[in-house]
C-alpha cells in the first residue's frame, strides 16, 4: 500500500515564513453571544408574523368574525323580518353613496327615491322578501362559521384519537383500522354528504353530522403519520422504561408534540367545511328558512342573479374572503410550526 | 408488482360493494316514497309497491339489487322517466359529464403546468406573482362561485358564452363549465409544478446537463420536467375528487345535462333508483381513477410499491 500512496501523492515542500500568515480575529475579543430564551409559542409567533399573507389572513378572519358577532346587532333589523314594501332594494350606504357606488341606483334609477324612502339605508340591500341583507349576511356568516368550527373540533377529537391509537399500537390493530379508513375514504365525500343530507331531518345538527362522517379521516392520517415518526424516539422509550401506561404515553408524551400539525390541519379543514356546507345549501339541503347560512344566501341569490345581482355578491365576497384568509392563515401557521418542512 | 396491483384491485372491489350497501341502506331510510301523487289511494300504492318489489324485506331487496347490478341492470326509473331503464337514461348524461370534466381537467393541467414552469424559471418575477395569486385563488374559491361569476359577467353582461346550456350550440355551452372546472386543477398543478421545478432545477444533475451544453429547451422538457411530473401524479387524486364534486354544482349552475344535474333532479323528485345509480356512477368513477393513479404511481416510483407491499 505504501508504494501506491507515494506514487499518487506528490510530496510538497513546505517552505513558508511565519509572515505569510495573518491571525484572523486578532483584534476581536471572542465572546459567546447569549440569545434571549424564547418560549415555543413566542417562536411560532415570530415566524408567523414574518409571513405577510398569513397576517393579512388573520386580520381578515378577525374582522369577519367580529362583524359576524356585532353585524346583526348594529343593523337594528332582524334577519327574519319581511317587509314586502321594501323588497328588491339595491345596496345603499351613507357616505359611500356620494362616491357613486352603493347609492341605491339600479338600472340607472334610484329605487329608494321612487319608493319614497329617502332616509332609509339598507347597506347590502334587501332580498326578494324585503329582508335586510346586511343582517342576513352576517347572521349567515355566523352560522356557517359555527357549523365549520363545531365540525372541525369533532373531527379533531375523533381523528386524533383514531390516528394516535392506530399508529401507536401498529400491527393487526393498525391494519384493521387502516383498511376501514381506506374503504370509507373510497366513497366520494360529497356523494355521502348529499345522501346523508337527504336522509337526516334538515337542520344544523344534521349538517354537522354529515360533515363529521368523513371529515376526521385527514386528521387521523396526520396524527398516525406523526405517531409513527415519534414512537421510536428515545424519550418515549425512556417513558416506557419508567413504566408509563399506554394511555399516558399516547396522550401525555406524544400528543403535545403533534399539536402544531393538528391545529394547522384544523385551520385547513375550516374552509373546506364552510365550502361543503355552502355546497349542501346550494343543492337545496341546507338549513331551513328563515335562518340563513352563506350557502343558502348564495343559493337564494342565484335565483335572481340576472335581475338583482347584488343579492348574491355580498355573500359570495364574504365566502371567498373567508376561504382565502383561512387558507393563507393555515399556510402561515404550517410554516411557523415547522420552519424546516419542505412544501 | 402483480401482488401490489392485485391488492389494490381487491380493496377497490371491497370499497365498491361497501358503497352499494351504504347507498342502499341510506335510500331505505330516506323519507318519502316514490309515489307521491295525492290521487293514489292506499290500495293503489300497495299495488305499486308490490309491482316494483318495494314491499319485500330489506336484505331481499338488497341482494336482488346487487345481483341485477352485476348484470349491468340498474333498475327502472319510477318518477323521472316512467319505467325507463336507468342504465339507458345514464348513457347520454354520463358522456356529457365526462366530456366537460375531461376538457376542464385538460385545460387546467396544461395551463397549470405552463404557469408553474414559467414561474419556476422566472423566479420572483411577475410571472411568479401571477402563479401565486392564481394558486391561492383557485384553491380558496369554490368552483361553483367561479361558475356563478362567469355566468354573470361573461355570460350575461358580455354575452360571450351562453348562460344556460344550449343543445344547438354545444361547443359554446361547454366553455363556461370548462373554465369553471379548470380553476382548481390549474391552481393545484401550477403550485406544485413551481415548487418541484425549483427543487429540480437546483439539483446537481441539472448542473451537469447545463455543463454538457444542452439547449435550454431540451434541458427543461427532457431533463427537468420528467422528474417534476412524478410528484404531480400524487396530487392528481385530490384534483380529480375536486373535479368530480365541482362538476355536480357547476353542471347545475350552467344547466348542463350531465350526471350532476340528473342526480339533483332525482334527489328532488325522490327517484330512488336514479339517485342510487348516479351516486354509484360517481363513486365507481372515483374509485377507478384512484386505482389507476395508485398503480401508475407504483409503476413510476418503485419505492412506493415496496413501502405499500411491506406494510
Image: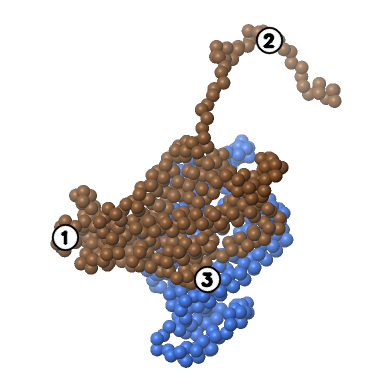
Chain colours: A brown, B blue
Identify residue for label 1. A117
Question: Can you say whether B266 is above or below A260 in the image?
Answer: below
Q: Are marks 3 and 1 in contact (CB under 8 Å)?
A: no
| CA distance for labels 1 and 2 | 98 Å
In the rendered structure, which disc, 1 or 2, sits on the residue that comes first in sequence?
2
Q: Quadrant of the N terminus of chain B?
A: bottom right
Question: Can you say whether A39 is above or below B253 in the image?
Answer: above
Identify residue for label 3. B279
Query: A109 or B186, which lies in front?
Result: A109
| CA distance for labels 3 and 1 | 50 Å
Query: Which residue shows up at 58% across the image and 43% down it?
Result: A257
Identify residue for label 2. A16
Element assignment for label 2 = loop
Query: Which residue shows up at 40% across the image and 66% down it?
Result: A287
- Residue A65 in the image: state x and y as whole percent: 37, 50
Q: Report in which chain the residue with disc 1 lies.
A: A
Amino acid at each position: 500500500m505504501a508504494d501506491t500512496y507515494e506514487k499518487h501523492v506528490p510530496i510538497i515542500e513546505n517552505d513558508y515564513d511565519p509572515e505569510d500568515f495573518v491571525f484572523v480575529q486578532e483584534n476581536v475579543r471572542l465572546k459567546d453571544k447569549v440569545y434571549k430564551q424564547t418560549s415555543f409559542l413566542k417562536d411560532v409567533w415570530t415566524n408567523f408574523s414574518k409571513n405577510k399573507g398569513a397576517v393579512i389572513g388573520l386580520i381578515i378572519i378577525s374582522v369577519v368574525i367580529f362583524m359576524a358577532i356585532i353585524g346583526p346587532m348594529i343593523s337594528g333589523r332582524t334577519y327574519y323580518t319581511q317587509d314586502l314594501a321594501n323588497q328588491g332594494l339595491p345596496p345603499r350606504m351613507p357616505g359611500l353613496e356620494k362616491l357613486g357606488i352603493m347609492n341605491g341606483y339600479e338600472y340607472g334609477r334610484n329605487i329608494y327615491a321612487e319608493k319614497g324612502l329617502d332616509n332609509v339605508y339598507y347597506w347590502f340591500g334587501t332580498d326578494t322578501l324585503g329582508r335586510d341583507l346586511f343582517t342576513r349576511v352576517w347572521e349567515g356568516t355566523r352560522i356557517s362559521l359555527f357549523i365549520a368550527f363545531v365540525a372541525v373540533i369533532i373531527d379533531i377529537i375523533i381523528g386524533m384519537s383514531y390516528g394516535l391509537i392506530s399508529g401507536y399500537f401498529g400491527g393487526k390493530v393498525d391494519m384493521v383500522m387502516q383498511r376501514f379508513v381506506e374503504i370509507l375514504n373510497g366513497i366520494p365525500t360529497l356523494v355521502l354528504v348529499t345522501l346523508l343530507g337527504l336522509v337526516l331531518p334538515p337542520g344544523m345538527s344534521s349538517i354537522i353530522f354529515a360533515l363529521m362522517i368523513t371529515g376526521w379521516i385527514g386528521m387521523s392520517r396526520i396524527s398516525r403519520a406523526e405517531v409513527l415518526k415519534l414512537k421510536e424516539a428515545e424519550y418515549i422509550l425512556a417513558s416506557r422504561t419508567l413504566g408509563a401506561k399506554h394511555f399516558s404515553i399516547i396522550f401525555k408524551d406524544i400528543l403535545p408534540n403533534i399539536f402544531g400539525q393538528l391545529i394547522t390541519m384544523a385551520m385547513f379543514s375550516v374552509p373546506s367545511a364552510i365550502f361543503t356546507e355552502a355546497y349542501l345549501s346550494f343543492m337545496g339541503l341546507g338549513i331551513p328558512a328563515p335562518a340563513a347560512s352563506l350557502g343558502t344566501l348564495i343559493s337564494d341569490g342565484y335565483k335572481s342573479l340576472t335581475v338583482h345581482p347584488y343579492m348574491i355578491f355580498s355573500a359570495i365576497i364574504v365566502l371567498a374572503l373567508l376561504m382565502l384568509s383561512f387558507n393563507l392563515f393555515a399556510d402561515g401557521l404550517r410554516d411557523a410550526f415547522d420552519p424546516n418542512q419542505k412544501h | 408488482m402483480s401482488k401490489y396491483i392485485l391488492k389494490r384491485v381487491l380493496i377497490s372491489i371491497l370499497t365498491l360493494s361497501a358503497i352499494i350497501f351504504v347507498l342502499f341502506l341510506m335510500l331505505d331510510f330516506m323519507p318519502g316514497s316514490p309515489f307521491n301523487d295525492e290521487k293514489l289511494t292506499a290500495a293503489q300504492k300497495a299495488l305499486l309497491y308490490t309491482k316494483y318489489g318495494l314491499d319485500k324485506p330489506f336484505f331481499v331487496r338488497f341482494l336482488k339489487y346487487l345481483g341485477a347490478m352485476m348484470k349491468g341492470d340498474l333498475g327502472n326509473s319510477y318518477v323521472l322517466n316512467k319505467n325507463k331503464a336507468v342504465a339507458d337514461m345514464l348513457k347520454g348524461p354520463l358522456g356529457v359529464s365526462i366530456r366537460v370534466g375531461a376538457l376542464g381537467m385538460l385545460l387546467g393541467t396544461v395551463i397549470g403546468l405552463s404557469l408553474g414552469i414559467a414561474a419556476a424559471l422566472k423566479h420572483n418575477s411577475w410571472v411568479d406573482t401571477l402563479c401565486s395569486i392564481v394558486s391561492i385563488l383557485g384553491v380558496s374559491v369554490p368552483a361553483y362561485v367561479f361558475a356563478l361569476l362567469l355566468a354573470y359577467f361573461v355570460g350575461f353582461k358580455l354575452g360571450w358564452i351562453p348562460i344556460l346550456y344550449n343543445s344547438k350550440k354545444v361547443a359554446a355551452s361547454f366553455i363556461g363549465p370548462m373554465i369553471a372546472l379548470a380553476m382548481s386543477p390549474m391552481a393545484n398543478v401550477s403550485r406544485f409544478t413551481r415548487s418541484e421545478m425549483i427543487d429540480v432545477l437546483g439539483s446537481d444533475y441539472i448542473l451537469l446537463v447545463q455543463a454538457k451544453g444542452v439547449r435550454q429547451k431540451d434541458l427543461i422538457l427532457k431533463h427537468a420536467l420528467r422528474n417534476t411530473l412524478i410528484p404531480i401524479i400524487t396530487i392528481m387524486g385530490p384534483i380529480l375528487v375536486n373535479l368530480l364534486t365541482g362538476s355536480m354544482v357547476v353542471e347545475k349552475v350552467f344547466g348542463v345535462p350531465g350526471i350532476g344535474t340528473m342526480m339533483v333532479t332525482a334527489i328532488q323528485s325522490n327517484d330512488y333508483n336514479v339517485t342510487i345509480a348516479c351516486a354509484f356512477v360517481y363513486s365507481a368513477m372515483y374509485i377507478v381513477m384512484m386505482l389507476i393513479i395508485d398503480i401508475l404511481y407504483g409503476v413510476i416510483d418503485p419505492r412506493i410499491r415496496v413501502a405499500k407491499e411491506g406494510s
